[in-house]
Image (tube, rainbow, N blue to C red):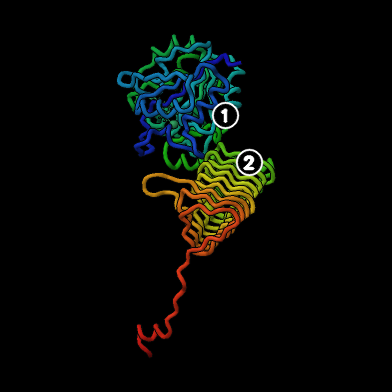
Amino acid sequence: MKNISVAIMAAGLGTRMKSSIPKVLHTISGFEMLYLIIKEAKLISDDVHVIIYHQAELIKEKMSHYFDDIHFILQDHQNFPGTGGAIRGINAKHERLLVLNGDMPLLQAKVMYNFMHYDADIVMSAFTCKEPFGYGRVIMDENHTVAKIVEEKDADEEEKKVTSVNAGVYLFKTSFLADNLPKLTNNNAQKEYYITDLVSLTSNVKAISVSEETFMGVNSKYHLSIAENLMQDRIKKTFMEKGVLMRLPQTIYIESDVEMEGECILENGVSLLKGAKISHSHIKTNSIIEKSIIKDSSIGPMARIRPDSVIENSHIGNFVEVKKSTLNGVKAGHLSYLGDTLIDEGTNIGCGTITCNYDGKGKYKTIIGKNVFVGSDTQLVAPVTIEDDVIIASGTTVTKNIPKGSLAINREPLKIIPDFFYKFFGKK
Ligand code: UD1
Ligand code: CA
């Protein structure tokens, strides 16, 4: 299939975002908007060009983490600013070029395919929208074909009332572009070369009607929040259809590479961040899970599972933080920090247990065997190993390895001084 080239325009300044981060690097559900659209473009094309200019190096560096086979094109922005300038430098491999805006995070490959069913110099896309402000208005002639696209800043009062707007995705014949791009001028309010002016240079334009939700362009942080909501709905709907139960889904946040299988339950306020893989588990209110595997377990409420943890057949209760730890068949019901630990089956971690994994310089491991009873308020000073069948008395600071079957206790005898209260505060 892939006999089509794609250009993604990402060279704009993104002034309306009011941000030091380039617009296309703002994230939706954990991933940069530009990453999302490149990923979809690569599904339909083996010739993807990304046009950059502002903060070009940063954009290139970020995208290079994900892709090694896309062409970055530097726009000649000084001489040819604007979307019409953006696509000048492209040497497309195929006879047709699909042009996308880098600020369209919701557009999917399956929708891009629709453009390819038509044969015209330009297949463009439009939708009708209640608040057309900011979009280019599509002006039809008496034959109901597209006469021109007028940008917000160039539109007169009558044109501004038009609610049919340019969605910003176009499929061009490459030969048409070669002949007509040099004809564009910057004779407009923004002194820019507009890609949209190309529709006035041919009568062979096909306009297809598309959905506003899928094609929305993100120009401001408010738009970013709308796109985020739409993306979250999309992600959650897919999981719910697969059998995941969500309480008050509008309060749940799930990043787009999260995986879930089996009958999972997510309570309100849960955040599942990048790389979380969850199966047959119950994640309770306000818990956060990041880049970890959770299997046949219950987590929370208010637990935080940090990257590189593997939790199986376990119960993690409220206010427990787990980091880079592997727990299998473990109960840690309340208020603990378990960092860089390996804990085996049948072990109970008492309330207030802390692994002291960091000495200010390095991080060290705590290894706990099977059937260990760790009393409340224990500190495990790593590196340390607790063998199977150990009891650690409440309030113990463990600084040595503990052999199988032992009790560890380092308590000072409790002193009781009669009537001390009255000596100290005096008697009333
Ligand atoms: C553009 C369209 C408008 C359409 C809207 C749909 C033009 C002139 N207008 O407006 O008709 O309704 O998209 O969302 O095309 N870019 C470059 N180089 C530049 C300028 C922009 O690569 O010199 C990139 C931007 O990074 C962005 C995309 O092109 O990803 C669109 O630019 P933007 O400024 O957002 O255009 P809109 O004003 O939204
Ligand atoms: Ca835009």
Split into quadrants, the picture shows ligand 1 in the one at: top left
Q: Secondary structure at mark 1?
A: loop
Query: Which of 153/99 is in front?
Result: 99
- Asked whether mark 1 lies closer than 8 Å to ligand 1, one says no
Query: Which of 116/185 is in front?
Result: 116
Residue occupying image coordinates x 50% and y 49%: 366
Quadrant where the N terminus sits is top right
Q: Nearer the viewer, mark 1 or mark 2?
A: 2
Instruction: Answer with the quarter of the image where residue 182 lies.
Output: top left
Residue occupying image coordinates x 64% and y 45%: 295
| Dot 1 alpha-carbon crowd within 10 angstroms: few under 14, some 14 to 19, many 20 or more | some
Query: Which of 334/326 is in front?
Result: 326
Dot 2 amino acid type: Met
Q: Which residue is mark 2?
A: 260
Residue occupying image coordinates x 59% and y 48%: 327
Query: Which of 357/103 is in front?
Result: 357
Dot 1 amino acid type: Gln
- Asked whether mark 2 lies closer than 8 Å to ligand 1, one says no
| Dot 2 alpha-carbon crowd within 10 angstroms: few under 14, some 14 to 19, many 20 or more | many
Gap in Å between the C-alphas at discs 1 and 2? Answer: 22 Å
> Residue 149 location in percent, x, y?
46, 25
Residue occupying image coordinates x 50% and y 42%: 226
| Mark 1 or mark 2: whose residue is earlier in sequence | 1
Q: Is residue 177 above or below residue 229?
A: above
Q: Secondary structure at mark 2?
A: strand
Instruction: Answer with the quarter of the image where residue 262 lies.
Output: top right
Q: Residue 329, which numbered label? A: none
Q: Is residue 234 left or right of residue 147?
A: right
> Residue 42 location in percent, x, y?
54, 22
Q: Residue 108, which numbered label? A: 1
> Residue 169 location in percent, x, y?
51, 25
